[in-house]
Structures are given as C-alpha cells and as structure tokens.
Image (cartoon, rainbow, N blue to C red):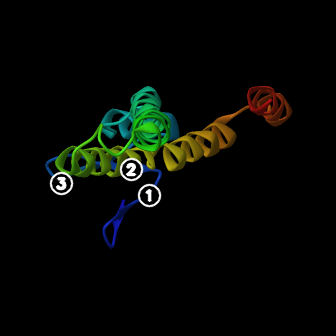
Amino acid sequence: MKYAGFVDADSVLLPHGASYDVGLHEWRLAMEERTGLTGSTLKIIALISMVLDHISRIVLTNGIMMRATYGQISNSQWTILETVADVTSTLGRIAFPIFCFLIVEGFVHTHNLFKYMLTMLGFAL
C-alpha cells in the first residue's frame, strides 16, 4: 500500500500509479529492475576516476610540472597543465566514496560476515 509517497514492502507502485500486493521476493526483483547503476558499473566508474586521479598526481603534478625547467614550458602551457591537473584530480576524488559505498553494500548483503572481513583484510594487505 502507498502511504504519504512511500511504498511499503508488501506492495509495489506500478509506473502508471496502480499498486498490487506481492511477496518480498517479487518486491526485491521489482526494485532491482528499477535501478540504473549496478555494482559493476559503479566499480568501472570508480576505477576510471581513480586512474584519472593517479594521472593527475603522478604524471602531471609530480612528473611534468615538478621537473620542468623555466624555459621548457611557456606560461600558457603551464596554465593548461595546471587546469588539466586540477580537473582530473577533482574527477578522481569521487572514487573513494564509491568504493566505500560498495564495501558497505557488500557488508550488508553478505551471508558470512567473518569470511567477508577476511576477504577485505586480504585485499587491504
């Protein structure tokens, strides 16, 4: 049933506004069909974001910009490098919250908490 804009676990709001009663399993399936981003998609987004951040920090900031002498890079090129480094670094900062979200999702949906913690510890080392 629908109460004040919310849908409870025993009913699902259909796209045209009608609702029908279903069990919890069917409700979960209906909710999964409504999501746009999967865990794999979020991992790919976070991975690309992390690579952009590493390019910004390692290649641009610590590589090209730190080791260039005064005559090698003009002022306009320097401005472009600074802008690209700032933009890629900013885009790269979204990786950490996405990975944290995925860790929490794994924690919530795991069947064996001890095994999940051991797996996380293994990846941390």
Q: Amino acid at mark 1?
A: Asp
Q: Is residue 48 left or right of residue 13?
A: right
| Dot 2 and dot 1 residues touching (CB under 8 Å) | yes
SS for callout 2: strand
| Dot 2 and dot 3 residues touching (CB under 8 Å) | no
106 or 84, nearer to the observer: 84
Q: CA distance from mark 1 to mark 3?
A: 15 Å
Decide: few, some or many residues near mark 1? Use Cα within 10 Å; few <14, some 14-19, many ≥20.
Answer: few
Decide: few, some or many residues near mark 2? Use Cα within 10 Å; few <14, some 14-19, many ≥20.
Answer: some
Decide: few, some or many residues near mark 3? Use Cα within 10 Å; few <14, some 14-19, many ≥20.
Answer: few
Q: Earlier in the sequence, mark 2 or mark 3?
A: 2
Query: Residue at (34%, 52%) from the top-left corner?
Result: 86
SS for callout 1: loop
110 or 84, nearer to the observer: 84
Q: Quadrant of the C terminus?
A: top right
Compared with 97, 106 (above or below) is above
- Residue 28, percent across and down? 46, 38
- Residue 83, percent across and down? 27, 51
From the image, tell me which residue sits under label 1.
8
From the image, tell me which residue sits under label 2.
11
Q: CA distance from mark 2 to mark 3?
A: 12 Å
